[in-house]
Image: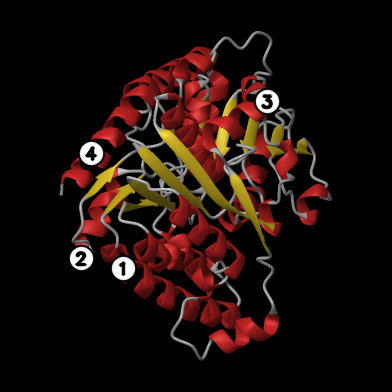
Amino acid sequence: MKILFICNKSPYPPNEGGSLGMYVFHKAIAETGHHVKVLALNTNKSYIDPAGIPEDFRKLTNIELIDKDLSVKPIPAFINLFSKKSFHVERFISKKFESKLTDVLKNEEFDIVQVEYLYMAPYLKVIRKYSNAKVVLRSHNIEHIIWERITTISKNPVKKLYLGSLTRKLKKYELLVINDFDGMTTVSKIDAEFFIRSGCRIPVTDIPFGIDVDKYNTQKGNYEFPSLFHLGAMNWIPNQEGIKWFLDNAWPLIHDKYPDLKFYIAGRMMPEWLLKLNLHNVEVPGEVPDASEFIKSKAVMIVPLFSGSGIRVKIVEGMALGNAVIATAIGAEGIDYTDGKNILIANTPGEFLKAVDRCIESREYCRQIGNNARKLVEENHSLRMIIRKLEGFYTSLMKN
């Protein structure tokens, strides 16, 4: 098959959940023998120098990047309040990208065009005009649910009102536009079932995040036990808000009981308030050179998310590396977990303290949680199995 991937950001470097989720799939599909072309926006939010893309990935994916400034400009943001269009989506519309996409479609025929993320849906009209390919939306999240949750926990009444307006327009757009595609994949069964209940009339299937488990070595060597850590892209609002909640509410309880225990906060695009954080035994290394090595050097992953949707790729990676994970129920959404067996679920400060107790007081229990987590990833997130499922979905669409 010949497959064109249209992306809201570059899949390389795979240094946060969204880009990693695309990078792994694009690379694996190309290595399976399909002809792949990647066309992506190169935004100021996650800008990359195209020269830094490795030659092997460039050859596999024929990747091209188009620059786009996503900075929020006050006047257009204000004017959008009086528009029926979704501000979240409108920001990703680029004449340069549309022109490049048109050229690609005029010069090459594709069997499948996969649109990564809802925010690239406006380009569907161009695809329909210049291609007969089946067009698939890969929904990485239920985007309006993320913003509904962010709006709900916002304490500023003016901000809450503004976010509520944006979110309603995003929801209306998301639930309408999905039926303009030929098919849709989601990252979890929960998301797929939500869209079906919400009126999705096109074929939809869940294609979870997949990894090559053989590349994730669980042997840790001299790792720091006990220790807590969080790893995630810190320019993503749910991560920032979750960490702030944890530091304000759960960490004081944990630190009082375990004054020598360290909590590490790592990730790209670390905000200034975290870099200047001055809390005893809370260390902020920022972006780390090797995420896997960082995860393996620590004991317990903390994922305190109260907004978001889809699946947390970093949790899957942590599980694959044999780490115990303590997460909120929202943080663990999309993963077919069993609380207390392959993950620990905590939604309140007291529950986080209790979960930390269980991991710290029994190193063997902590190790067993990690081992069970690894087994879960092997059973549910094997890249080889998931790519076969995706190929089958593509084939079924092409027959219709």
Q: Nearer the viewer, mark 3 or mark 4?
A: 4
**Secondary element at tag 1:** helix
Image quadrant containing the N terminus: top left
Q: Mark 2 or mark 3, which is nearer the start of the sequence?
A: 2
Mark 3 → mark 4, Cα distance in angstroms: 39 Å
Residue topped by disc 4: 395
Q: Residue at x 39, y 57 (%)?
A: 142
Which one is nearer the viewer's eye here, 244 or 93?
A: 93
From this view, report whether residue 314 is shown above or below residue 136. Answer: above
Please give left or right for residue 372 compared with residue 46 in the image. Answer: left
Task: Report, in whole angstroms, how far the alpha carbon at label 3 lies from the one at label 2.
Answer: 43 Å
Q: CA distance from mark 1 to mark 4?
A: 25 Å
Question: Of discs 4 and 2, which sits in the foreground?
Answer: 4
Foreground residue among 312 and 209: 209
Contact between labelled residues 2 and 1, with CB atoms less than 8 Å apart:
yes
* Left or right side of 212 for 217: right
Q: Which residue is the site of mark 2?
A: 199
Q: Is residue 287 visible?
A: no
State which quadrant residue 84 falls in: bottom left
Amino acid of disc 2: Gly
**SS label for mark 3:** helix
Q: Which residue is mark 1?
A: 175
Q: Position of residue 139 (x, y in %)?
A: 38, 52
Mark nearer the viewer, 1 or 4: 4
Which of the two marks, 1 or 3, is nearer to us in this view?
A: 1
Amino acid bearing label 3: Phe
Q: Find disc 3 in the rendering and name its residue.
A: 294
